[in-house]
Image (cartoon, rainbow, N blue to C red):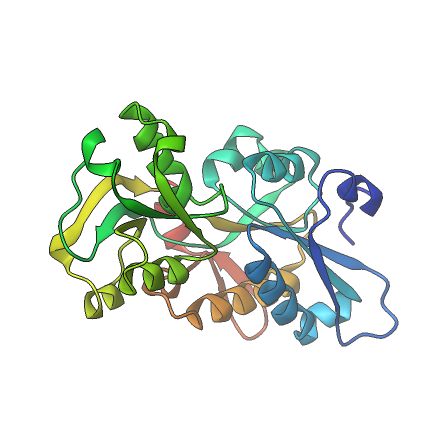
Amino acid sequence: MQSKAPISDIDAFIETSYQCATKSDVNLNELVVYSSGKVLAEDVAKVLCSDDTISKQYGTVTSYWGYKTSDTIEFLGKGIADLILAKENLINAFMAESTYNYQAVVGFPNYTAYLISSTEKPRVEKSYFLDKRIGLLDYPTSRSGHILPKQLFKKLDINLENLNIVYASSHSELRELLASGQVDLISSYWQDSDQAKFSANYITPISDNISGSRWYLKMENENTDLLCAVQLRLTELARSQNSHYFNHVESFWECDAEKQIKRSTGENNAAN
């Protein structure tokens, strides 16, 4: 099985986790997963625990989540997770592919971050934001919902304490706040389904070509059964989400019925 840091080392810097048992009642091996956000971490663990192939190799799945880039860095730097959701630039910075043989399994497309309003096209001006109720995400790892708008405010020399910021726990909740009139604008990505409630004329891009996250699996041996099972479950989970963005998940490996695999051409193109 894959080697990893003792669980006590993980708990030393992150305490948020969810654990479930696979279908095996004798296997003592543990599959360690890391992602951002409680809901995602729990959903991923549940689909992995239900998989027959994973049950043949692991007895439990422990899914950790963190809200800071430093948490992701801690996992990458120590090679703790068997399966991790991370940005490609972090994987490259820590040479995680060569050091721990992390292989990209599935990924999400690049996207644009927008300011979205229901009544007017947002203006990127300091005076415009000062009397507005602004909806942001409350987890600091979100680029479109947290990092980029705050970078914009800093660039405009706006003290965050002078802004009326309303925090939400998800992009869906941000849209609910905007639709109900509880905020004047939000920062998020734009998806096709948004046109049912909001006008495409009332969005303003604040950053484009933002790299999407990827799921990476530690492949210290030729465990192709595991790779194909993980890729299938993650792809199914992504496509079950009510989100145009997550529905466009890309699989990086081609698995046939005998679990013979090869790297798909899409993964090579995504790396360019």
Q: Nearer the viewer, residue 242 or 230?
A: 242
Quarter of the image where the C terminus is located: top left
User: How many numbered marks have been drawn onto this rendered protein structure?
Assistant: 0
Whether residue 58 appears in this view of the structure is no
**Residue 204 location, quadrant:** top left
Q: Residue at x 80, y 67 (%)?
A: 59
**Quadrant the N terminus occupies:** bottom right
Q: Nearer the viewer, residue 58 or 174?
A: 174
Residue 6 location in percent, x, y? 83, 44
Whether 150 is drawn above or below 80: the answer is above
187 vs 192: above or below: above
Closer to us: 55 or 145: 145
Q: Position of residue 174 (x, y in %)?
A: 37, 57
In this image, 190 relative to 139: left or right?
left
Residue 96, image x and y in percent?
60, 36
Residue visible at 26% across and 25% down in the picture: 156
Classify 110 as above or below 125: below
Going 46% across and 34% down the picture, which residue do you hit?
89
Identify the image quadrant of residue 61: bottom right
Relative depth, front residue between 78 and 195:
195
- In this orientation, does residue 201 appear? yes
Residue 188 position in % (x across, y down): 32, 50
Q: Is residue 40 left or right of residue 115?
A: right
Could you tell me which residue is drawn at 56 percent across and 39 percent down?
68
